Image: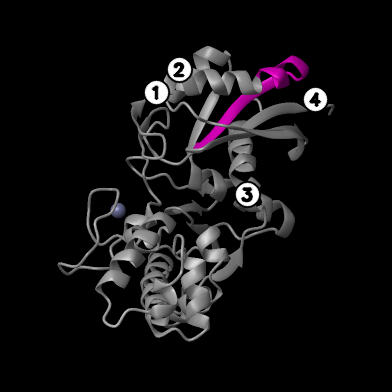
Amino acid sequence: MHQEPTYHIGMDLGGTNLRWALYRRHRGIMTLETADRAPLEDHEPQAVCTRMAECVAPLREKYSVNAVGIGVAGMLSSDSKTILRAPNLNWTDFPLVDVLGAKLGLPVYLLNDLSAITWGEYHYAHHEHGLKESFLVVYLGTGIGGGMIFRGDLLTGHNGVAGEIGHTKVVFDESARLCGCGKRGCIEAYLGGKNFIAWMNEELAAEVPPSTALSSRHGALHPGIVDAMARAYDSFSLSIIERTSLMLGSVLANAVTLMDPGVLLLGGTVWENAPLLRELTLKHYSELVNPLAEATVVSSALGDDAGIWGAAHWAACQEPTL
Ligand SMILES: [Zn+2]
């Protein structure tokens, strides 16, 4: 049977950049046509929608676009039409799907950024390697997020906020750090890239004697720097990496014990830049997980493009004719 190709746009709506790509889908195979990015200076919601429409306008002159999929770092309503909370954009309760959909005159489908990454990585791996039916993704970057596919379906949860693994608790005493979500003791308050830097400054100020190696460094103390110092046997840095690897290893082991996903994909800048943290986390994970549920650990296959690819693929999958 003859089948015409269809065109779908995937977008990543971040706090500093807007990234997008156009994909051609034919006989179930998605191929990249073109991709671009633009800085996002004005975060006012209507201005962002106008900017998004401007960015995709040249593509629509050339291609007959069917739908737009968007991944955004934030919590969504259960119908995935409204952004309830997006701290990077400073948005609350903004109905992006309806506003942008009306502006574009196209169907718009919204996903949490980690759900878009998870959907992208899962479908890529599924096509390439005949992947198992369930899949857990955990990303450690500025924040910590997760996504899960269960038997081919994206798990979004009753309220649409499943996968917020960064807000699982790892510290319970009065020292527990305050997280951006308003609660104390979340793993994101320690290992989220932004919070990690603030935490290091607090710990260094309190340490007696302080780590002279770290104290004398200029600039932000990213996890990769502390990991490198730990590998050079700086005792303060080593204690931080040991502590955080136990936090992360136990969070991953608990999630896998609960969900039994078969495959655990780990990624994000913090994960990629901290080899000792990776090694010790995986050691703790293996020790703590239910051995009957232990998942195969894999790395990202799509890298930075996973979210955009996933958002476009998600939009294509929502089309009733496909
Ligand atoms: Zn939190």
Residue type, label 4: Glu
Q: Position of residue 212 (x, y in %)?
A: 39, 79
The residue identified by callout 1 is 95
The residue identified by callout 2 is 99
* SS under mark 2: helix
* Image position of 300 (left or right of 5): left
Dot 2 or dot 3, earlier in sequence = 2
The residue identified by callout 4 is 4
The residue identified by callout 3 is 304
- Would you place residue 80 above or below residue 48 in this image? below
Q: CA distance from mark 3 to mark 4?
A: 29 Å
* Image position of 220 (left or right of 18): left
* SS under mark 1: loop
Picture quadrant of residue 1: top right
Residue type, label 3: Asp
* SS under mark 4: loop
Q: Which residues are magenta?
A: 57-71
